[in-house]
Amino acid sequence: MKPLNILFLFLYITLSGTKADTGYQALLQWKESLAQTSSLNTWSLDDNHTIPCNWWGVTCSPMGNILQLVLRNAVINGTLHKLNMSSLYTLTRLDLSSNFLHGPIPPTISALSNLRFLDLGNNKFDGVIPPELGSLSELLDLRLYNNSLVGPIPFQISKLQKVQYFDLGDNHLENPDYSRLSVMQSVVHLSLYRNNLTLEFPLVILKFANLTYLDLSENQSTGSIPDLSATNLIHLKHLNLSYNNFNGKIPASLRNLSWLRDLRMGSNNFCDGIPDFLGSISELERLELFANPLGGSLPSSLGQLQALRHINLHGVRIKSTIPEELSLAGNKLSGEIPTWIGRKMPFLAVLRLRSNSFHGEISSQLAQLKFLHVLDLSENKLAGNIPQALGSMVSMSKNNQLQSTRDFDIYNYFWKMSRYHHSSNFGILIKWKGNDSNIPLKSGFVTTIDLASNHLSGIIPKETTNLSSLVVLNLANNSIGGSITDMIGNMKQLESLDLSMNRLTGTIPLSLGSLNFLEWLNLSYNNLSGTIPMSPQLQTLDDPSIYAGNLGLCGFPLGQICSNSETVDSDNYGPHNEKLGFHFWVLLDSSILGFVLGFWVFFGVVALIKSWRFRYLILPFY
């Protein structure tokens, strides 16, 4: 290599190193201003950490320039006042999300001219969004969600023509000057939820041609939804307008959004009924229209939504007699539960029809819902027997783990919905241990069957005990008779069991004591009798009201002492051991009976026949 080239290379490396050193010094200066820095212990220039590119959260280029600073969940506390942005102009990614940073976002952030990803979300930043952010022309991803930012959204940020992901949700932001907003053609994800936006639906958004996700929920927006038929929102998959003051009809132009999967318009003032065309949005997986004064009847076209996994029509004031229509909780629906649900909605994971006026019998077709994890038909007027076929529901009869690809898809869907719902506690409302509870879907489904408060009769089918992953079983307040099957011990995952206020007879099976996860039990107000089984698990359920109203019961925790003081330890006495014990006593009784009969037959013959008397009774003694 020529000497001149070597000189140029030396000068380039030297200058680059000087700029890099400036960046490192800026980080150290910022660290000194922070109140909590335990996660930044590697940020030091002592002998152990002489290479700043090895600092935690820092990524460098081959030339030593700082390219990325990622300190997500670093438990750092402080402001950005002492962070010299101009010394970090080589940054392409800055992620300080989920910390305890506060104060305003400094206007000097515009010095990060190469920035492509900026996430300051889930902190305590306050003040206004600096208009200078609009000069970060290379930005692709902007996230300022869950802070305390105030004031109008600066129209200057619409100059970010490369931004694809745009999230300003959960702040206190106000309306921008919509007349000065530029069309942001590149935006795919736009989230402005939980702010102080008023006025009508912003028409400029209708020109965002690549938008797939739009969330304007939890604001104070008013007026009707504009006609979407002439818009560019053909790629929209998620639309959330819930918790606003929108009114008028649900626009018929929604039918043109053929890719729509998630439609949420709950808690507004929409009226004039549920439109029939909703059944033609074939990709729809989630539909929420709750808390709107819609009125009218429920269109049967909703039965065409074969991809539908969640629907919430709670409190929409619909009235209908529906021999073949879909329905949900908290309305005034009547008629029989349609049998086509099991055939046309095979991927349903949750079916809640509680608190209506359905009558007739429970269809065995529901057993075809092989991915069903929650079945809630409580508080209706259903009659007849519990179908034996329910004992064959696949997702309830295997271990509560995601064993199939489809199970994983369904759980992943609900996990995404919890993220979309802005809550890690997103879940399903079920009757849990005697109370209505919203059970979060953080780690899986709480597999549930709730048929309480109907007019069901017959017996509890033994096939029900095949549902080995069932966690909650509630059959309370019916007219179910017969005995509690000995095979109930097979339901090893049961945590909540309510059979109260029925007509059950006989004894409490010993196998009930083998349910090691049972935390809530109610057998009150039946006709049960005999000794309450003893086991370590049942002894933890020491509330006498569990067994109240069964005059023939005795033993712990009731005050009634059993006449037979012998109690049976049922901890290791499951249904199989009960069968073994039964067979043992049958064998023993048979053996004794056989011996007695054989003894008297033999000696009777000997007494009658002289030659036998001599041979078998007299001769042996000589």
Image (tube, helix red, strand yellow):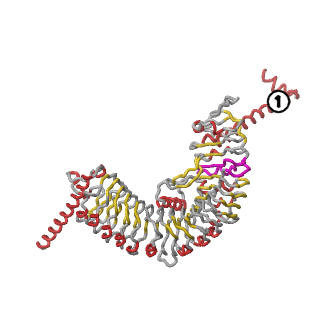
Question: Eyeballing the image, is 489 above or below 233?
Answer: above
Residue 369: x and y in percent read 62, 60
Q: What's drawn in magenta, residue-wise? A: 453-480
- To which quarter of the image does residue 194 belong? bottom left
Q: Is residue 221 left or right of residue 598?
A: left
Taking the spot 27% from the left edge, 56% from the top edge, the residue there is 55
The location of residue 151, given as percent across then percent down, is 37, 63
Q: Residues within 10 Å of mark 1 (few under 14, many from 20)?
A: few
**Which of the pair 551/248 is nearer the observer?**
248
Residue 492 visible in the shown view: no
Residue 301 on image: x %, y %: 63, 70
Rendering quarter of residue 517: top right
How far from the left and from the top, in percent, is residue 143? 38, 63
400 magenta-colored: no
Relative to the observer, which residue lies in front, 48 or 297? 297
Q: Main secondary structure of the magenta part?
A: loop
**Farthest top residue in view:** 622
Q: Quadrant of the N terminus?
A: bottom left
Q: Is residue 63 left or right of residue 105?
A: left
Q: Which residue in the structure is indicated by mark 1? A: 600
